[in-house]
Structure formats: C-alpha cells, structure tokens
Image (cartoon, coloured by chain):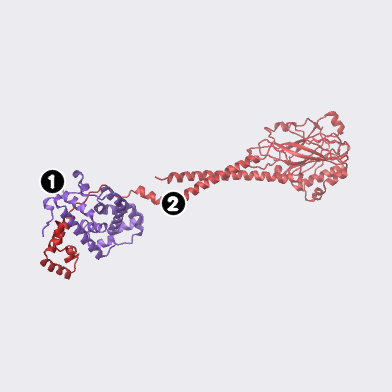
Amino acid sequence: MDEVALVAAAGKGDVRAFNQLVIRYQSIAYNLAYRILGDEDAASDATQDAFVSAFKAMPRFRGGSFKAWVLRIVTNACYDQLRVRRRRPTNSLDDLEGDADHSPYLLDPAERPDEVVARRELDSVIQAGILTLPTEQRSVLVLSDVQGMDYHEIAQVTGLALGTVKSRLSRGRAKLRDYLLDHRELLPAQYRLRSDR
Amino acid sequence: MNWLRRNTHRTEDECCGERLSAYLDCELSAEEQAAVERHLEACKDCRWHLETLRQTVEWTRECAPVRLPRVFTIPVETIAPKAVRARRPAWGLPLLQGATALIAVLFALVVAGDLFLGGSAPRSEPQMVALQATTVMDQASTAQQVEVTRVVELAAPAPTVVAEAAVEMAPAQPAAAKAAPTERAAVTAAPAEPITPPPSAPEEPTMTAPAPTGAAEVGGVGGGLPEISVTMEVMAAAVEPSPGLAKAVATSTATVTLAFTAVVPSPTQPLTVGVMLTSSMMSGQAPMLVITPTATASPAAYLATTAGPTRALVDLTAAVPAVETPASAPAPIDTADGEAEQDATTMAAMEEGYNATVPTEAPAALLLRPEPTAIAAAPEARDVEQGDRSGEEQGPVGTLRESVASWFGLAELVLGAAFVLLALATAVVMLRWQPR
C-alpha cells in the first residue's frame, strides 16, 4: 500500500495503517529527536508523543509531504522536551562519552576496531557540538546535515522561509565547525580540522 | 590563541556571508556561485572557511544513525478504547448512575407507601366472600336497615373485613319512609330483574353468640327518637383469584355473611337496618341480595330463647339484586353494593316491605341461608381496619383505596423492573469502560 493510501486510511482512524507509516518514519523521527535532545530517553518520549499526536491530528492532515508533517510534529515535541528539561544543565561532552560499550550509534562492524573507536569519538564530539547550538539552528542543522534534507524540505518541516533556513544553517555549521576546532585535541588525528589557514 | 587568529583573519561573514554554506549545498544561483568561486580564488581565509565547513558537514553527515530503543507503533488495543472513550460523552455514566439511584428511591418510596397504606398484602386465590351478620334485637321493630358503610381490604386470601353499620331507629313507619326518599326515586333505574318475594317458609332463626370478630354499637339519641348505630365486622373469605389486584369481586358462588350486633332500646320502635356492600367488593358483578328473615317470634321471644345475637347470612349467589322479604315481615336487612342503582333497588324493596308486610312486632332477626360453617371455613381471617359511618361516601372511598392499591402494585412492578434494568446497564457500562 502506498503512502497516500496509508495516510488516507490513517486519517480515518486506521491505527494499523498509521503504524505502517510509523515503521516507515520512526528511524528518521527518533534520530532527529536524539540529535536535537541528545538523550535517548527524552528522544524516545518525544518520538512516541509525536506519533500519538500525529495519529490524533491525522484527520486534520491536509495533504503534502507526510514526512515533513511528521518531522515537524517531532521537532515540536522536542521543543516541549527541551522546555521541560530547561532547568537541568545541558549535556556536556563528558556526559556523551559515557560508557563506550553502550554507544547509541550504529557503527559499521566491518570497520577496524580502532576506526570504530575513532568514529565513535567524533560522533560524540559532533553531537556535543550540536547541543551547543541554539535550538532553532540545531533543528535546521540536524535536518540538513544529519537527515540530509534540502532547503525546501527543511522549510516545510520548520515552517521557515528559505532565506531563514539558509541563514540558520550557515550559522549553525560555522558554530559546529568552531566547536570541533575548539575540541580538536579530543579527537583522533584524522578527525582534527586544519586550524592553520 | 584562537581569538588572536580570528582577529587577524576575516570571518566568512565579512567576505561571503552565508554564501559558503549554500555554496556547499549547491543552493546558489549560477551567478552567485560564479561570484563565490571568483572570490575564493583571491581570498585565503574564505578558502579555509569553505574547507573546514565542508569537512564539518561531511563528518556530520557521516554520523552513524542511532539505534531505535524500541518500536514506536501505537498499540491498537490502547488507542481504540481511547477513541471510544473520547466519543462517549463524559456525562453518560453519571447520568445512568443518577437515574438508577432515582428509580431506587422512587421504588423504595412506593413500597413504603404501599406498606403504610396496607394495600400490599398478597392477593392470592380467594374463592369466597363471607359476611356474617348477627343482630341482637332487644325490641320488636318494623324496619331495620343495617348499612355497612365501609368494607375494607379484601386483598388477603382470607381476610376479615371490618365493616361499619349504622342502625337508625325510627319511631314509626313514616320515619322509615322518610329515610329513603332518594332511593325510591332511583327505582326506575333499577335492574329489570324483579325483586323476588321472600320464601314463604323461612327457616328457624339462628341465634348464635356474636362472632368473635363482630362488634356492634347501638346508641340512642333523644327520648323518642333514639338513633342506633351498629358497628359491624364483616368476614370476607374470598376475593377474585387475581393476585396483585386490589379489587375484590364476589363470584357467583360467593356467600357473604355480615355479623353485627344491635340493641334496640324500645320494643315498639321500628329499627331500620341497612347493609351496603361497597362496590369494591362487588366490582364487576351485581350482587343478588336474598334476605330471608326466618324469625317470626317476638323480640321478647328472642331474648327469652336465645339471649344472644342473631345470625343472618346474606347470599350473593346471583348476579341480579333481589330482596326477599317474608310475608310475616320481620325486620329486613338489606345488603347492597355501593352502586346507586343497586342501593336504590334494595332500599325501595325494603321500604315496600316495611309498609306492606312488616309487623311492628316482628323480630329483627333474618336468616337467608344459615351457614354457621361459612365463617369457620374462612381460613386465616385477617382483621383489617374499620371505616367511619359516613355511609354513602364509603363506597367511593373504598373504591379509591383499592384503585390506589392497584396503582401501587403497578408502580412497584414498573419501578422494580426499571431499577433492575438500569442497575444492569450501569454495571455493564462501568465494567466496560472503566479506566485502564
């Protein structure tokens, strides 16, 4: 069953049809939430809340990109989570390093072990850098550079104008680059940015 | 040292602004892209910016996706009931509970009212109505009228009906004639069945002791015109075998026996005794009044021979009212139901008997069909209340009481069934939609 039919059935309250859409987009939704929130439990809660909200809001879905619509709900659910967690300090790099045996990242097992470790360290620093970005830049950068969405899709998800998307993305990338430069000593040699010009 | 380095080099904003990021994504127009490329050839700082940005974006895009901690599908069994609960109005269950409570209270009130009014006795298979009338006539009287002003409660299988009789003492026939002017006027509306004469050979009067349930009061008022009131207790042994119905209907084979005691103060004054059965007893069936006075002896003889009350039995074996009065004219006892035309017929017949045949010295004892066992055969007689002496109002009052009792029964049935249904519905709703 194609996505249009699934969306139509879900709009009439068909939970099974909606669950097929969930299976199709849950990985994207959870990764977006995790990159924005930096916490597995919070990302899980936000993702679940977003899908429940999406199912309830299905009768009001007016067509267009279901993916963009769902990811927008996920983004809003992440903002809600951030508002709840605002009293708590932001995750630091130390928090992210944590237990290496329980890394959330799906690394390629074919890689050499030292490569796996190095890549895991880079991912951790990148994630920590993302969490330092302002929320509005964070979501745009994640949608673009983690999810691989183009500017038009990002504008659909965020509801922003293309120019705003472009600007926020540029500033977010520059800040993340600066974060990697500032923490280049923590990274393996192959993942250190060239600091000299 | 970074701040020193940054201060000595131009930032990307100073040169290309946001164009380097868009340039990486190929989101610039051809002209913008060409301009950026021309600038990059001449600007070392922007080349470094572009290179570090490209590396950052590349590493970010290469970030491994995170593994799903679980599946985020929505459980059908939790969403579907939620949808049902959402559609169900929030006031549904409280409304159901309130209705159940209201019906329960109404049911309790109706049952309590029924018990309070005494109308809820089980109505079951009564077969015979028996009334025993026992009179003690101290004096000879030319006319007697015992009026049962109220018959109450024929609901029980073998109830004792307490009736009240008023015995009026009139000095002479004119008084008796005056006593029933209205009834005489209503004779034209009487049933077509003629009033049969009394048996020519009445039986021996049965003088018995007053029935245990019988009670009589005779009071005289004034010197020459004493008024006598007789309180009667009527034992009724049968009503229509229709459980739950308040109305008692005498069957064609019912025998009604009235028991009363009267004391006539003056032997020369006529005693008017009338017996009136309320319509509640005779509903749906016209009683046949067969009054067979068997006593011809003088009151003094009664006193001498029995010194006790006289038992009179009134048979209700036919559907048409009739009054049999003996040629020797003892004091007639009239038994009629509460309906006007039957009363009128009876009263007219009585008056005729008074004027034509009843000797002043005739005893007042009457016996239609001596059935001493009738009372004894009435099982489990039950005493019920006594009405007042307002005579003509008692018939409608008795009817009203029975009507009320029947309505009570109907209300109990309806409310009970409604309560059971509502309670079941409430239980089902609460179990079905209880919060998970």
10 Å neighbourhood of mark 2: few (<14), some, or many (≥20)?
A: few
State the mark number for residue A113.
1
Confirm whether residue B119 shows in the render: no
**Residue B267 lies in what quarter of the image?**
top right
Give the residue at x 85% y 46%: B178
x then y, percent, for residue B421: 51, 45
Vertical placement of A194 versus B384: above or below?
below
Task: Name which residue type carries label 1.
Answer: Pro
Dot 2 falls on a residue whose secondary structure is loop
Q: Is residue B234 visible?
A: yes
Q: Chain of mark 1?
A: A
Q: Quadrant of the C terminus of chain A?
A: bottom left
- Residue B424 falls left or right of residue B314: left
Q: Is residue B29 above or below residue B281?
A: below
Horizontal side of residue B168 vs A59, given as left or right: right
Residue B433 screen position, x and y as percent: 42, 46
Q: For chain B, what colour was chosen?
A: red
> Which of these two is toward me, B197 or B170?
B170
Pointers 2 and 1 within a single chain: no
* Chain of the residue on which disc 2 is drawn: B
Q: Which residue is mark 2?
A: B88
Q: Decide which of B300, B44 is in the foreground and name it.
A: B44
Seen in the picture, residue B294 relative to B70 is either above or below; the reply is above
* Chain letter for the part of the structure drawn in purple: A
Mark 1 secondary-structure assignment: helix
Q: Which mark is residue B236?
A: none
Going by the numbered disc 2, the residue's amino acid type is Arg
- Please identify the quadrant where the N terminus of chain A is shown: bottom left
* Classed neighbour count for the residue bearing mark 1: other residues with Cα under 10 Å, few (<14), some (14–19), many (≥20): few
C-alpha span from label 2 to label 1 = 58 Å
- In the image, taking residue B91 as reference, residue B271 lies left or right, namely right
